[in-house]
Image (spheres, rainbow, N blue to C red):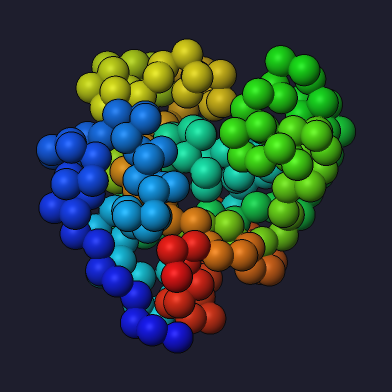
């Protein structure tokens, strides 16, 4: 397989007409799906070499919503000092509360942004027990102070709040980049941050 193309921020700016970061929601999603931008945002490609990566396990549909950049932040009750690449793993668990949420007609439009199949199956087709993507964890904020940060980053506040738990005392984990895998990779997962070793660096959706 040919060596991956390294995408620089200059190429992104030429393609989107935007300079510099932060990107708006529309520009961020453009970067993730534009053939010219090839699912990459500069720093990730330089750091995703064959080496273990920290990973976090999320329940569906939250894992896919984050991996597909439909939500830009993950909300947790705990803090981490980690900053940088973080693999997004979908838990095997598929409980009634998750199924009920995905079956709610009001939630279907969010699933449709992942894929028509996700919406048609009420989330049942979403991969579970797999690593879906690698994101770049940029920053953490207290949820009670999140709105000014979301506004500064041009993130749609009602959508982000609808797709997270922003109760007081929690943390919003803000991702500045997300790179989807060509195909989900099976993994067991774990609690907290755990170590995942990608089998190869040529598995990104852009190659």
* Residue at x 32% of width, y 35% of height: 27
Image quarter (top left, top right, bottom left or bottom right) of the C terminus: bottom left
The outermost residue toward the right is 96
Residue in the foreground of this view, choosing between 173 and 2: 2
* Relative vertical location of residue 60 with respect to residue 135 in this rendering, above or below: above
Instruction: Quadrant for residue 8, please give it.
Output: bottom left
Residue in the foreground of this view, choosing between 137 and 176: 176
* Residue at x 35% of width, y 70% of height: 48
Q: Is residue 188 left or right of residue 21?
A: right
The outermost residue toward the bottom is 1
* Residue at x 50% of width, y 19% of height: 159
| Residue 54 appears in view | no
Residue in the foreground of this view, choosing between 159 and 87: 159
* Residue at x 48% of width, y 81% of height: 200
Question: How many marks on residues?
Answer: 0
- Spot occupied by residue 85 in the image (x, y as percentages of width and height): 36, 59
| Residue 57 appears in view | yes
Image quarter (top left, top right, bottom left or bottom right) of the N terminus: bottom left
- Spot occupied by residue 151 in the image (x, y as percentages of width and height): 28, 18
Q: Is residue 58 left or right of residue 87?
A: right
- Spot occupied by residue 29 in the image (x, y as percentages of width and height): 41, 38
Q: Is residue 31 left or right of residue 63?
A: left
- Spot occupied by residue 41 in the image (x, y as percentages of width and height): 29, 53
Q: Is residue 204 left or right of residue 154?
A: right
* Relative vertical location of residue 73 with respect to residue 159 in this rendering, above or below: below
Instruction: Quadrant for residue 149, please give it.
Output: top left
């Amino acid at each position: 397989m040919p060596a991956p193309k390294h995408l620089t921020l200059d190429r992104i700016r030429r393609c989107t007409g935007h300079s510099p970061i932060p990107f708006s929601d529309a520009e961020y999603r453009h970067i993730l799906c534009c053939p010219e931008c090839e699912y990459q945002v500069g720093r990730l490609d330089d750091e995703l070499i064959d080496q273990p990566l920290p990973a976090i396990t999320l329940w569906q549909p939250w894992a896919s919503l984050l991996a597909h950049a439909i939500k830009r932040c993950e909300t947790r009750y705990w803090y981490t000092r980690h900053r940088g690449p973080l693999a997004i793993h979908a838990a095997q668990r598929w409980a009634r509360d998750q199924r009920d949420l995905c079956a709610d007609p009001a939630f279907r439009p969010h699933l449709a942004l992942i894929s028509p199949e996700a919406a048609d199956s009420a989330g049942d087709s979403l991969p579970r027990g797999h690593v879906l993507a690698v994101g770049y964890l940029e920053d953490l904020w207290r949820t009670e102070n999140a709105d000014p940060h979301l506004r500064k980053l041009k993130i749609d506040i009602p959508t982000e709040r609808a797709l997270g738990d922003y109760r007081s005392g929690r943390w919003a984990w803000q991702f500045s980049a997300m790179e989807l895998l060509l195909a989900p990779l099976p993994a067991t997962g774990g609690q907290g941050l755990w170590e995942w070793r990608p089998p190869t660096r040529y598995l990104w959706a852009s190659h």
